[in-house]
Amino acid sequence: MPYLDTLNAKFAGAFTMSSFRDNQRVLVDAEQAPKVLFALLKCLKEECGFDFLTDIGGVDYLGYAGATDRYCVVYGLTNLATGERVWVKAFANDPEPELPSVVELWKGADWMEREVYDMYGVRFPGHPDHRRILMPSEYTGHPLRKDYPLRGYGERHNFPTVTRADS
């Protein structure tokens, strides 16, 4: 893992590593993430060859044993030349979970960041079009948060019914 030497030289103490099966993970806690995440991902792209953003997803660790941070945004990166993959897990906490936008690095992050915002409420300062992508714009909740009630907050009656003929 030559990229690990590069990351250690540039970001010593800002992250930890873990692995599961053949997945290598770079973990950036909620205190460090707002400060170093963009630079770390830029380094992985430009200096280490991880030129393809495979995925961005969200995780809510509410009630998870041993979790110290609430939200996690997972960035899946692939080096197309070598086929090597790395997962960067950046954490954020309430009351205003935020991580820097990476749309400047990968244009494909646009809709993925909007989906994480819509479902989990993690904001991405610097995003060019920060609005909901799946839920109506009037919707106030974030349905994939673990504290969101299974039956919702009763918001369904607040939205107009759209019939098949109207759609």
Image: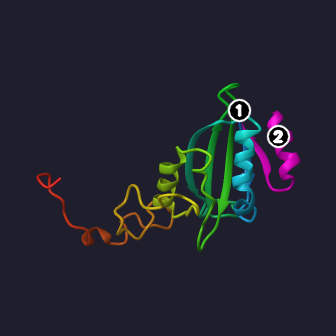
Residue type, numbered disc 2: Leu
Q: Indicate which disc residue 100 carries.
A: none
At x 64% / y 39%, what residue is drawn? 77
Residue 18: % across, % down = 76, 45
Assess whether residue 48 is covered by the magenta stretch.
no
Residue 122: % across, % down = 55, 63
Highlighted magenta segment, given as a residue range: 1-20
Mark 2, residues whose alpha carbon is within 10 Å: few (<14), some, or many (≥20)?
Answer: few
Left or right: residue 73 versus residue 120 is right
Foreground of the two, 156 or 75: 75
The residue under label 2 is 4
Foreground of the two, 41 or 154: 41
Left or right: residue 62 versus residue 143 is right
Foreground of the two, 104 or 53: 104
Residue 147: % across, % down = 50, 67
CA gap, disc 1 and disc 2: 15 Å
Residue type, numbered disc 1: Asp
At x 67% / y 51%, what residue is drawn? 89
Vertical comparison of 41 with 159: above or below = above
At x 67% / y 64%, what residue is drawn? 69
Identify the element where label 1 is drawn. Answer: loop
Assess whether residue 7 is covered by the magenta stretch.
yes
Image quadrant where one finds the N terminus: top right
Left or right: residue 76 versus residue 121 is right
Q: Indicate which disc residue 22 carries.
A: 1
Foreground of the two, 57 or 6: 6
Left or right: residue 150 versus residue 20 is left
User: Quarter-wise, where is residue 72 in the image?
Assistant: bottom right
